[in-house]
Amino acid sequence: MLALSRKKNEALVINNNVEITVLEIKGEQVKLGISAPREVPVYRKEVYVQIQDSNQEAVNVDGMEALKTLLG
């Protein structure tokens, strides 16, 4: 993991096309602005984990149903 220090209005660039800017700092909370192309999905980690879990459940459930159908 790369750890960087940034102040308000400072930014960092990832892969030449994603820019993350520190917009505001209040106590322990930091507000970030993210500029990225539309084709680059940006999620909060907890939302991303939920999406991954739901996708995995769908694969597992659909896979089991497909096997049951095949086996009769």
Image (cartoon, rainbow, N blue to C red):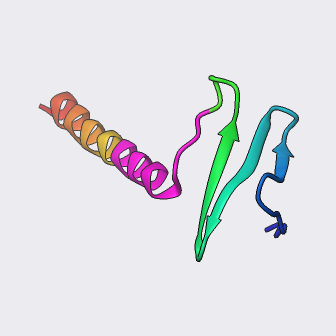
- State which region is magenta: 41-56
- Residue occupying image coordinates x 21% and y 29%: 70
Q: Main secondary structure of the magenta part?
A: helix
Q: Residue furthest top?
A: 38
Q: Residue at x 51, y 52 (%)?
A: 44
Quadrant of the frame with the C terminus = top left
Vertical arrangement, residue 49 with respect to residue 66, above or below = below
Q: Which residue corresponds to the image point at 38% horizontal and 42% vertical from the top-left?
A: 55
Residue 53 magenta-drawn? yes
Q: How many marks?
A: 0
Near-viewer residue (10 or 64): 10
Q: Say whether residue 43 is magenta.
A: yes
Across and down, in percent, residue 31 comes to: 60, 56
Taking the view exactly as shown, the residue that stands out farthest to the bottom is 27
- Check the picture and name the quadrant holding the N terminus: bottom right
Q: Is residue 24 left or right of residue 3?
A: left
Q: Residue furthest left?
A: 72
Residue beneath the point at 82% across and 44% down: 14
Residue 3 located left or right of residue 53: right
User: Eyeballing the image, is 26 above or below 50?
Assistant: below
Figure quadrant of residue 59: top left
Where does residue 42 sit, x and y in percent of width and height?
Answer: 58, 40
Residue 23: % across, % down: 68, 52
Judged left or right of residue 8, residue 23 is: left
* Image coords of residue 48 (percent x, y): 48, 49
Front-lying residue, 69 or 48: 48
